[in-house]
Amino acid sequence: MPIEDNRPVKVEVKNLTKRFGDLLVLDNMSFNIRKGEFVCVVGPTGCGKSTFLNCLTRIHMPSEGDLYIDGVPADPKKHNISFVFQEPSALPWQTVAENIAYGLKIKRLPKEEIDQRVNQILDLMGLQEFRNSYPGELSVSAEQRIIIGRSFAMKPDLLLMDEPYGQMDVKMRFYLEDEVIRLWKELGSTVIFITHNIEEAVYLAEKVLILTNKPAKIKEEIVIDLPRPRDITDPRFIEYRNDITDKIKWW
Amino acid sequence: MEQVNGKQKTIRNVLYWGLPVLAIALIVAGWIAFSGAHPDLMPSPATVWSRFIKTFTKPIAKTTLLGHAWASLKRVLLALLVAWAFGISFGILIGWNRKARAFFGSIFEVIRPIPPIAWIPIIIMWFGIGEFPKILLVFIGTFVPLVINTSTGIELVDRINIQVGQIFGGNNGQILKDIVIPTALPSIFAGIRTSVSSGWTTVLAAEMLGANAGLGSLVTRGWQGSDLSLVMVAVITIAIIGALLSVILQKLEKVVCPWNN
């Protein structure tokens, strides 16, 4: 179901392959992501999703193939790649505002720019009143919001999210999913969101990449053509969900 | 119901204020009883108090009690400043840099278990009994706990926090400064606390072996002159200063590591 999309290609993954010794984890993966696109990656547990992400962030180097941003091989020093970890990863010794400013300070942005972006994120996320609190004083979900805000504050070329809501209950997940969509729309970031929750993928994504079992390949790309805000009880929503579930279930 | 709870709370408050007071009262009562029964072995609190007053009216070695306390404190603080600067840097170095740890680690492991007091004969033979050898001894006694706590704190840094630094493109220096050292700060502070108490212990030992001023010299002087009241005055002063130092450090830790409360 190809739909017209004029946005330029932002991220190009070409023949990405990763081996650990003899163990092939990622097998020749290729796909493109357009600028400002929201892509969800789903796949069976243990299919190599984390390795996939770690190759994109350069925590691991790919064995073959590569990741290109704006046509150049990705380089964390040059490009702005942001990452939201599955585990809470706010820095406990920094206040909420300092955490959000953290990446901006490393990039040595001017102080006014940092203040402006931090305030924008705090406003967008309703964290303004907690700006001087420490993460340890807040709930786990607030901490997760801090690190999501920290990543969006970077206005990243590419924002990677690794099951950021994996540990949360349904109510909190719905709330944070809407939050992430709001930030994404407001800031126009390009997002790769990894999840094992198919409903979450259909709710969030413009495009879903389905991975196969290990060694991971791209099994299929599905464009989710649903208006927002999406309704999880909409028959078309359920159709997408069942379709993806079947594709993950049957090899 | 609420009234009962309120009442229980008051009782609990009284209890937790009262118990420490009771403990001190019991010690004083025991002291009075013991000194009453064996006046030759233990001066009574009243005798110690009048001896305390006398340290101001009739200075010992031309110095009042305050002067002696300051002499000890000055040695400890000087040594501590140097030890903090070197111990924390060295701890960071061997905690962060594997080559440095490989090189210095074994030497440090050998030196580590030597009690600081064991250095006294060597230090006196090399440097005499002036000011420098005392400060050097305190330095040795405080350096070790600082290095151990700092390097352990650095090694305990959460992998994910370092990855956060890497993802945002921090270089090694930035990761060390922004991520690793702050994570290690509570451990570094534990090292500072240990260093202060071990420094205080070492300075007294050093002073007891030969000094004109300092609380340790008062202990020795009282002991050799069979002036047990003076020994008690010195010991209680040592205890009070030690307790004050630890209170100050606790407050300081709350200021330096506010997230850690």
Image (cartoon, coloured by chain):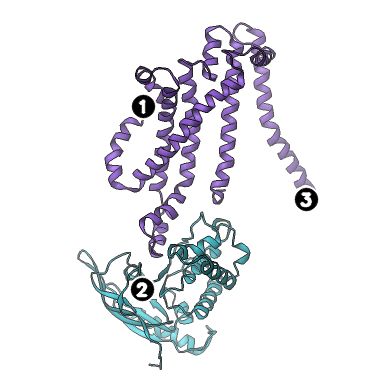
Chain colours: A cyan, B purple
Give the residue type at disc 1: Ile
State the separation of the CA atoms marked 2 and 1. Answer: 57 Å
Q: Are marks 2 and 1 in contact (CB under 8 Å)?
A: no
Q: Nearer the viewer, mark 2 or mark 1?
A: 1
Give the residue type at disc 2: Pro
Looking at the rendered structure, the secondary structure element under dot 1 is loop
- The chain that hosts pointer 1 is B
**In-front residue for pair B157/A201:** B157
The residue carrying mark 2 is A44
Quadrant for residue B94, please give it: top left
The residue carrying mark 1 is B114
Does A23 appear above or below B34?
Answer: below
State the separation of the CA atoms marked 2 and 3. Answer: 54 Å
- The chain that hosts pointer 3 is B
Looking at the rendered structure, the secondary structure element under dot 3 is helix
Q: Residue A132, how many percent across, how many down?
A: 59, 59
Q: Do the residues labelled 2 and 3 touch (CB within 8 Å)?
A: no
Residue B1 visible in the picture: no
Does A231 appear above or below A141?
Answer: below
The residue carrying mark 3 is B2
